[in-house]
Image: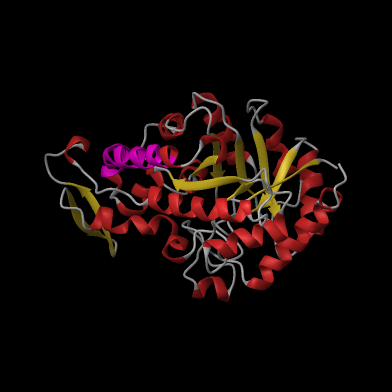
């Protein structure tokens, strides 16, 4: 077996409540999963869109219409030092979900070694959605202060031995792919900027990254391209498939160069269209530290364990010892697709489930 006996969840799970998400993980995905998210139910399923009012109703920013979209920008004559944001709510959701996490773990619904995973979009992701291009770098710098306050509050509220903090990087991936213009000087500056929020995570808290392309099968992607099918079009989704593993390797290596502390895990999205050795060959250039777990999003509901094993065999020609995951979160999966993923995890890790090493 070329892959490790571990499975990574990135955040969202299509369950009505946090408690339901924990029960689903505990009953259908453990023991392969150790870092457990709360499923991001309700409005949080909209990811960074929860931050809309912080930008578009912010009196310290100007709001303009660009190609039919309302975008924030710096007021004339101002800099990042003049921009303020209200308190964010990431810490409130994390503290409440951690309380429910403890109850679930204490009742035996979650495995004893479970950690609570909190996922947060980086400042670059927020400004890419809400800020005019020429103001993105300055506004991202201003956004760092309240976001750092949130991360520090999360670490004050949750025991460090129980906590993992994940940074979501879809816009970083898209920019390195060349799908978005780069407001920074070069890609190296993107990695350096991303290292700043990573450094806010204390050494005894786990730090992870989600290198994301959106969900290709649902068209749930911020990137350009035609919808893959009518259902995706109805959701408003668009998608361009990444050519190969080059970008996930470049971003992983860049993070490894710049992040000043240990990186505990990197999750890298992949797509079903990578069906040739050439798609996976860039993995040979992966240069992360030995202590960093690396997860490939090889599991897709539509082709289950068989498809994941096929893609794992291709990837294993160039990289050994990686863990498995889905392409993105499970928030857009139907109940049937959730069960298909869980069945695939059962089959892929059947020896582990039975207690066999």
Residue 80 part of the magenta segment: no
Q: Is residue 226 left or right of residue 342?
A: left
From the image, which quarter does the C terminus lie in? Answer: top right
Kindly identify the residue that appears in the image at 72 percent across and 43 percent down: 323
Residue 140 part of the magenta segment: yes
Q: Is residue 298 left or right of residue 192?
A: right
With respect to residue 194, does 25 lie above or below? below
Which residues, given as a range, are shown in magenta? 135-154
**Where does residue 27 sit, x and y in percent of width and height?**
71, 60
- The colour scheme of the drawn protein is secondary structure
Residue 344 quadrant: bottom right
Q: Is residue 238 left or right of residue 140?
A: right
Q: Is residue 200 left or right of residue 319?
A: left
**Where does residue 12 sit, x and y in percent of width and height?**
54, 58
* Residue 269 visible within the image: yes
Residue 124 quadrant: top left
């Amino acid at each position: 077996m070329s892959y490790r006996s571990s499975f990574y969840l990135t955040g969202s799970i299509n369950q009505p409540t946090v408690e339901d998400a924990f029960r689903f993980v505990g009953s259908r995905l453990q023991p392969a999963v150790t870092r457990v998210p709360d499923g991001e139910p309700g409005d949080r399923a909209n990811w960074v869109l929860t931050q809309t009012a912080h930008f578009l109703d912010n009196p310290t920013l100007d709001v303009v219409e660009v190609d039919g979209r309302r975008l924030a920008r710096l007021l004339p004559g101002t800099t990042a030092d003049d921009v303020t944001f209200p308190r964010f709510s990431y810490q409130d959701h994390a503290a409440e979900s951690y309380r429910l996490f403890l109850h679930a773990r204490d009742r035996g619904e979650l495995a004893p070694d479970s950690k609570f995973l909190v996922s947060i979009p980086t400042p670059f992701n927020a400004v890419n959605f809400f800020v005019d291009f020429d103001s993105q770098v300055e506004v991202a710098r201003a956004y760092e202060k309240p976001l750092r306050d949130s991360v520090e509050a999360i670490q004050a509220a949750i025991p460090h031995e129980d906590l993992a903090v994940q940074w979501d990087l879809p816009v970083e991936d898209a920019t390195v792919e060349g799908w978005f213009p780069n407001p920074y000087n070069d890609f190296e500056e993107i990695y350096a900027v991303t290292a700043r929020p990573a450094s806010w995570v204390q050494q005894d808290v786990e730090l992870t990254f989600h290198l994301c392309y959106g969900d290709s099968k649902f068209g749930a992607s911020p990137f350009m391209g035609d919808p893959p099918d009518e259902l995706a079009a109805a959701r408003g989704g668009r998608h361009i498939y990444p050519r190969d593993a080059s970008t996930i390797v470049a971003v992983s290596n860049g993070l490894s160069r710049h992040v000043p502390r240990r990186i505990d895990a990197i999750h890298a999205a992949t797509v079903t269209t990578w069906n040739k050795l050439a798609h996976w060959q860039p993995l040979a250039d992966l240069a992360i530290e030995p202590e960093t777990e690396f997860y490939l999003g090889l599991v897709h509901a539509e082709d289950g364990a068989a498809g994941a094993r096929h893609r794992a065999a291709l990837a294993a020609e160039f990289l050994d010892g990686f863990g498995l995951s889905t392409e993105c979160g499970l928030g857009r999966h139907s109940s049937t697709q959730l069960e298909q993923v869980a069945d695939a995890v059962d089959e892929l890790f059947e020896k582990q489930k039975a207690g066999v090493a």
